[in-house]
Image: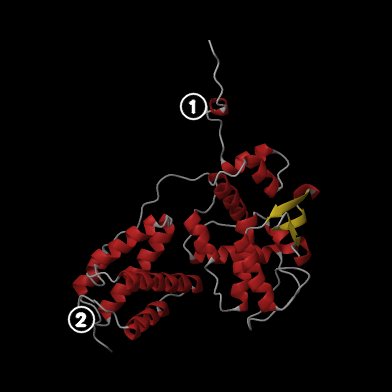
Amino acid sequence: METLPAPIMQPSPDAIARLKALLLDSVNSPESKRAYGRAIEDFLDWYRRESPGTGFTKATVQSYRVHLLSAGRSASTVNVRMSAIRRLAAEAADNGLMAPELASGVGRVKGVKREGVRTGNWLTVGQAEELVNAPDPDTLKGKRDRALLAILIGCGLRREEAATLTLEHIQQRDARWVIVDMKGKGGRVRTVPMPSWSKAAMDVWTAAAGFTSGRVFRPVNKGDRLSGGQMTAQSIFETVKKYAAEIGVANIAPHDLRRTFAKLAHRGRAALEQIQLSLGHASVQTTERYLGVRQDLTDAPCDRLGLHLTV
């Protein structure tokens, strides 16, 4: 096996590929294999881009950790990445491709402590982007799953609504794409605006699958071919859980992506009543519970009126 200098200043792609294969062979869970594989590829992409002069060392891995935190990655995501890199260093040392003392240094780079408890489960901007980009875009199933995640996060649909979504629902109103006549909970019908990136992901999927009408999300078999007319709400649930696990985020279900839509829209200063309309809530109080909104007596609406009384 090829021997690399220590510290490793210019890792050989062939050597890294062998190390990655050895590492993934030691992992039993398919989801962990995918998560570790993605973590290693992301680290190597960053490594090639930044070309750290310290090589593959503790200092380099610490810099990558800072990069992940600066990009808004969650503690759980950072911890999965660090775990994969530590195991990669150990595998390199075991196979004579890295000095043991360097591998030991990398192994001492700690993860991130989780502080506080969030109200409900929802994703940060960085996690949401990572989730939508998790499916393999080179497969038909990956195209479908990317479109599904983009619709759930971008439009705030319930999983039952995504299962019944048809191409006939997708229409243009006021020069933008929307989901019209979406029948939701309690039989309430609403129109849901669709972001351009969700529409683009859906178009890639439907073009590759070769259909122009009917249900948007359909089963794909192990041969990567269409195998039915409609995904079930349960299969949508399982799809979301699968990719959430791959990016290292636990306890995320389709309804949490709906909550993510509301949270991120509110943080982006979308009007509360507009979020309510998109979600199809019967009352604004339900939307407020999604957002964890509480009355602010120190910065109240009446302080924003801009009026002054002459005394």
Find residue 23 and report its horizontal and vertical position in percent. Answer: 37, 77
Residue appearing at x 66%, y 44% in the figure: 274
Which residue is label 1 attached to? Answer: 298
Q: Which mark is residue 214?
A: none
Q: Counting other residues with Cα less than 10 Å from the Cα at mark 2, is it few (<14), some (14-19), or many (20 or more)?
A: few
Residue 104 as seen in the image, left or right of residue 200: left
Say which of marks 1 and 2 sits in front.
Answer: 1
Q: Earlier in the sequence, mark 1 or mark 2?
A: 2
Q: Give amino acid for label 1.
A: Thr
**Residue 270 visible here:** yes
Q: Give amino acid for label 2.
A: Pro
The total of numbered circles placed on residues is: 2
Up the image or down, 299 lies above or below 194; here it is: above
Q: Counting other residues with Cα less than 10 Å from the Cα at mark 1, is it few (<14), some (14-19), or many (20 or more)?
A: few
Looking at the rendering, which quadrant does residue 46 occupy? bottom left
Residue appearing at x 35%, y 64% in the figure: 82
Q: Residue furthest top?
A: 311
Find residue 60 and report its horizontal and vertical position in percent. Answer: 27, 66
Which residue is label 2 attached to? Answer: 5
For the residues marked 1 and 2, what is the alpha-carbon distance in whole angstroms?
Answer: 61 Å
Looking at the rendering, which quadrant does residue 295 occupy? top right
Find residue 276 and report its horizontal and vertical position in percent. Answer: 67, 44
Up the image or down, 228 lies above or below 183; here it is: below
Whether the residues at callouts 1 and 2 have beta carbons within 8 Å, the answer is: no
Residue appearing at x 35%, y 55% in the figure: 112
